[in-house]
Amino acid sequence: MAHHKSAIKRIRVAERNRQRNRYYRSTMRTMIKKVRNAETKEEALELYQKTVSLLDKLVVKGIIHRNQAANKKSRLYKYVSSLT
């Protein structure tokens, strides 16, 4: 266990950030699943736009890498485009 005041604070901050990042990642996965489970192309496109917005926010916050976000957006768009 940490003894220095600053180390104790770092432990608290790291745990808080871990919980926040976990929430964002979970939300990201849920939104991707919603796009994949959409019934119609119009519904999927609307959900896709919201998901892309979230992915871009996560990149800015440093939660995911920009290339990972680009790959997810690309795969999702390919899927949405294949819907009829």
Image (spheres, grey):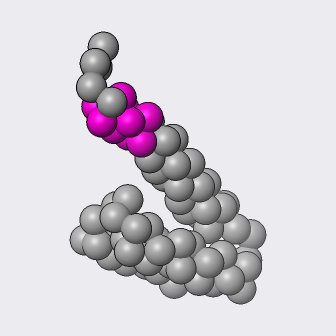
Q: Please tell me which residue is depicted at 44% across the width and 77% down the height of the picture.
A: 56
The chief SS type of the magenta part is helix
Q: In which quarter of the image is residue 39?
A: bottom right
The magenta region covers 6-14
Percent x, y of residue 2: 28, 19
User: In which quadrant of the rendered image does the N terminus lie?
Assistant: top left
Residue 78 in view, yes or no: yes
Percent x, y of residue 64: 34, 61
**Per the image, is 2 magenta?**
no
- Picture mark count: 0
The relative height of residue 54 versus residue 12 in the rendered view (above or below) is below
Residue ranking furthest to the front: 5
Q: Please tell me which residue is depicted at 53% across the width and 55% down the height of the picture.
A: 24
The relative height of residue 28 versus residue 41 in the rendered view (above or below) is above
Percent x, y of residue 17: 44, 46
User: In which quadrant of the rendered image does the C terminus lie?
Assistant: bottom right
Q: In which quarter of the image is residue 47?
A: bottom right
Horizontal relation, residue 66 to residue 79: left or right? left
26 or 4, which is in the foreground? 4
Residue 22 in view, yes or no: no
14 or 28, which is in the foreground? 14
Q: Please tell me which residue is depicted at 53% across the width and 72% down the height of the picture.
A: 54
Percent x, y of residue 65: 28, 65
The relative height of residue 37 versus residue 8 in the rendered view (above or below) is below
Q: Please tell me which residue is depicted at 49% across the width and 41% down the height of the picture.
A: 16
77 or 63, which is in the foreground? 63
82 or 24, which is in the foreground? 24
Residue ranking furthest to the top: 1
Horizontal relation, residue 61 to residue 49: left or right? left
Horizontal relation, residue 49 to residue 1: left or right? right
